[in-house]
Image (cartoon, helix red, strand yellow):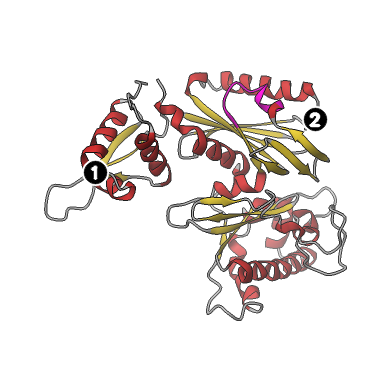
Amino acid sequence: MAAVNTGKMQNPERILRLLRTESMLTKQEVARRLHLSMPTTLQNINDLIEAGILEECGTSESTGGRKAKKIRLRRRAGLGIGIDIALHHTQLVVTDLLGEVLVQQVLPLQFCDEPEWYRSLGTSLEHFLQANQIPAQTVLSVGISFPGIIDDESQLLLRSHILGLEHIQLDRFHKNIPFPVVVANDANCACFSELRPERPTYLYVSLNESVGGALMLENRLHLGDTWQAGEIGHMLLVPGGDPCYCGKRGCADAYLSPKCLLEKGQTLQTFFRRVQAEDPAACRAWDRYLEYLAIFLTNLRMLMNTDLIVGGEVGACIAPYLDTLCDKAAQYDRFSRDVDYIYPCSRKQSAFAAGASMLALERYSSRLLCP
């Protein structure tokens, strides 16, 4: 890839960021969105095309004159790596600049906060790239999804209930990975993977082994005063109810984690096959789950008054039951004409890892501009 002689990096970086959130734009649209003059816009775009970072991709609708050419990112001008660290496994993905997963692998790498585990992660990543013929020089950044509260400013894992950790320095990741690294909360990563130009604000509800959430406000993750905005799994749903792993009783997590639906040894896929076969016990469990979920979602709607995206393992399966869920939600929401604000996630697989890659690319994609 040719180097871009930008002098001042600000405008090329702004153009790059804009085209990571918009699929394609005309040069005139870029100038208008970024409040740049046309000569400045044309010079920067031409430099980026020459460098192999942007490409022309057709023309806009004619308004009477010559059709304006559209431009977009060359999706594979650089690559991102996403790593999802869970208790019993680790997932690796490679994504293009817009977050499409190109290759992936799940490793039986059970987390352990020991130096050898971090060295194993670095070695596994190296082997993963070699096996998939991914040149290291094409990798811009690595994003790591982690089930815990992350203080990005202090580079500190504050707490992870699931992994039983507190106050862990994140430099142990940086030391073993030879690329710029961003470590983020897993629900924040999944939330970021759902970002679309037409929907800049939404609340993401992650229904996984543990229940979590994340809030996107005008294309930016809202992290809160102490980095734990979106810990909705520990909002009280049933006072004095079932015990939660956090030590309280009646948390949403105790009623909305997928494990609430499963019998011993059963998978979620098996459970939904039973529902589809109209197994009475499975249907009762699913109806009870949807009732609690409807209460939970309408409470969140009252708080945020924005779209709600249902993700995680359950969110990936919920689309066929969305009408039922919305009907139940309508019983608890007397302020909306229609319950038209609940959506199933669009990223049904690898959301944590892909979102982590996208978050890291958001911070480090300007490395494309470096000689």
Secondary structure that dominates the magenta span: loop
Residue type pointed to by label 2: Asp
Residue, disc 1: 37
In the rendered image, which quarter is residue 291 located in? Answer: bottom right
| Residue 253 x/y as whole percent | 77, 57
| Residue 10 counted in the magenta span | no
| Residue 45 x/y as whole percent | 28, 35
In the rendered image, which quarter is residue 332 located in? Answer: bottom right
201 or 170, which lies in front?
170
Q: Residue 113 carries which label?
A: 2
Between discs 2 and 1, the one toward the N terminus: 1
In the rendered image, which quarter is residue 119 located in? Answer: top right
Q: Which mark is residue 215?
A: none
Viewport quadrant of the C terminus: top left
Q: Which marked residue is nearer to the observer: mark 2 or mark 1?
A: 1
Residue type pointed to by label 1: Ser
**Can residue 7 be spotted in the picture?**
yes
Residue shown at the point (33%, 27%) measured from the top left: 6
Badge 1 density bin: few <14, some 14–19, many ≥20, Cα 10 Å? few
Q: What stretch is highlighted in magenta?
A: 172-181
Residue shown at the point (70%, 66%) measured from the top left: 293
| Residue 368 x/y as whole percent | 42, 28
Residue shown at the point (52%, 19%) measured from the top left: 136
User: Farthest residue toward the left?
Assistant: 65
Q: What element carries label 2?
A: loop
